[in-house]
Amino acid sequence: MSDEIRPSEAPAHDADWEALTRLVAGESDAVESAAVSAWLATHPRDAALVSLVKTHTEQIAGRSVEHVDVEQALAAVRRRMTDTPALRVHRGGAGAAPAVLDSVHRSRFGRPGVWRWRGPVLAAAAALTAIVVGLAPWKSRATDAAQVYATRVGQRDSVQLPDGSVIVLAPGSRLTVASGFNGTHREVALEGAAFFTVTHDDRRPFVVRARGAEIRDLGTAFSVKSDARGAVSVAVTHGVVALRDTMAGSPAPVELRAGDRGTLHAGTVAVARGTVTDDDVAWTRGQLAYRDASLAEVQADLRRWYGIELAVPDRVLAGRTLTASFHSDSASQVVRVIALALGAEVVQRGDTILLLPLSPDFTPKP
């Protein structure tokens, strides 16, 4: 297979802006954290702003506010810093030249999203504190209307709900928060994949609906993921959830505890006890890790992460499983590894990548 695979490309996005956000929010994996920290080490003014945001959010969280939305705080600061006219701080009397806060420039990461300052860091501290403090009280309010959060192909994002629950959305996913959330009920709908860290409330259970599955929190952290067959998989990393098939109208949910995986497909819930590992949530750190994974799961992930439509028309080949891991690999590298692992050859037809059984005269390309 050559590097001529050309999956549909997602629009360019602020990759380093998201990386900075994850670093401040404590969501970066080791590789990303090291890369961003190394860049900040050579850009002291940018590092000072990141440190300032982190310090103020930690101070607020340490007082009476339970949760602070770091991403919203950083976004507000970013908007404030790129407003026209720029923030001007006069020093040394009326005749002194103002210090100007520049708008966003393109960093050596190659994308917009890192700030460049002229003038003292403390000039922006008061405005920054006001922004962060002003964002904190939102956490206790109920949502009056349904809210939708969506990610593009290849883009992860995190969402903090008014009850303090935090959801990490996988690429190509969509989360709908029901109107009235955090009032009389707490209910969301998911298309794609997400990891939930739920603030437990006995009076108002947290409910996730995904493709006919109802996942009810009993005080826990868990991931929910749909595959190319329409199956929904729930992997519990902490606490307990109840999984129920709403399409079949079954009144009896299946209880899943930490380490358990439940998969709902074609009206049947299959449970694997004690099989969940760190690999099941590696995607939250930007890594795809598979251990005897079905190709239906791999197909869904490739669509979300790379925009690749992977087709496996051969039934024998489609029944095989994959054990592999990928981190920052290109689409071509990922497909190449999958083909080698499954003993298949790759054929591209338009926007679709076909995995086919090896022909007798097949010779893999270097």
Image: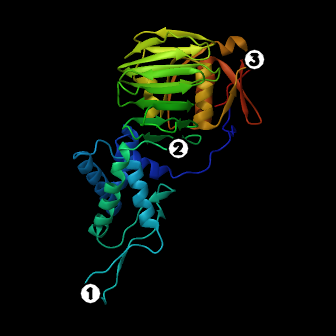
Q: SS for tag 3?
A: loop
Q: Which residue is mark 1?
A: 93
Image quarter (top left, top right, bottom left or bottom right) of the N terminus: top right
Q: Residue at x 52, y 36 (%)?
A: 178
Task: Measure the alpha-carbon separation of dots 1 and 3.
Answer: 81 Å
Q: Position of residue 227 (x, y in %)?
A: 60, 23
* In the image, farthest residue toward the bottom: 95
Disc 2 crowd, CA 10 A, few/some/many (<14, 14-19, 20+):
few
Image quarter (top left, top right, bottom left or bottom right) of the C terminus: top right
Q: Which residue is mark 3?
A: 359
Along the line of sight, the residue nearer the viewer: 160 or 124: 160
Q: Position of residue 122 (x, y in %)?
A: 26, 67
Along the line of sight, the residue nearer the viewer: 307 or 4: 307
Q: Which mark is residue 145?
A: 2
Disc 3 crowd, CA 10 A, few/some/many (<14, 14-19, 20+):
few
Question: Does residue 82 appear in this view?
Answer: yes
The answer to whether residue 143 is above or below residue 297 is below
Task: Measure the alpha-carbon separation of dots 1 and 2.
Answer: 49 Å
Question: Does residue 329 appear in this view?
Answer: no
Report the amino acid beneath label 1: Gly
